[in-house]
Amino acid sequence: MWLVIVGVLLILLKFADVSPVAGWSWLWVLSPLVGAAIWWVWADSSGYTQRKAMQRMDEKKEERRQRALEAIGQADPRKRKK
């Protein structure tokens, strides 16, 4: 995500003729967007994206489980949030 933000900012600076970006080659200005595309291809092909989504889902399920246990008074006091 950061690469996309940096890429968009560089494009805006290039169009606005803000120094020093105005003098840069378009290759350098667009390189963060190329980096973002490479990252997304790798993340999708390696399964990284799916693993992260499953991890977030598991964390949400555990939080719901803990809230339900606290609601009925069966929560483990060692697992309570500080």
Image (cartoon, rainbow, N blue to C red):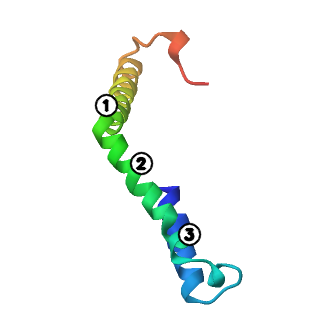
Q: Mark 3 points at which residue?
A: 28
Quadrant of the snapshot with the C terminus: top right
In the image, residue 79 above or below residue 12: above
Which residue was labeled with disc 1? 54
Residue, x 57% and y 83% (percent of image)?
A: 14
Q: Report x, y in % for residue 59.
A: 39, 28
At label 2, the amino acid type is Trp
Q: Position of residue 22 (x, y in %)?
A: 63, 84
Q: Which of marks 2 and 1 is nearer the N terminus?
A: 2
Find numbered disc 1 in the image and state the secondary structure of the residue it sits on: helix
Residue that appears at 62% across and 78% down: 24
| Residue at the extreme right | 19
The disc, 2 or 3, on the residue closer to the chain's N-terminal end is 3
Pick the residue in front: 78 or 11.
Answer: 11
Q: Is residue 68 above or below residue 23?
A: above
Quadrant location of residue 28? bottom right
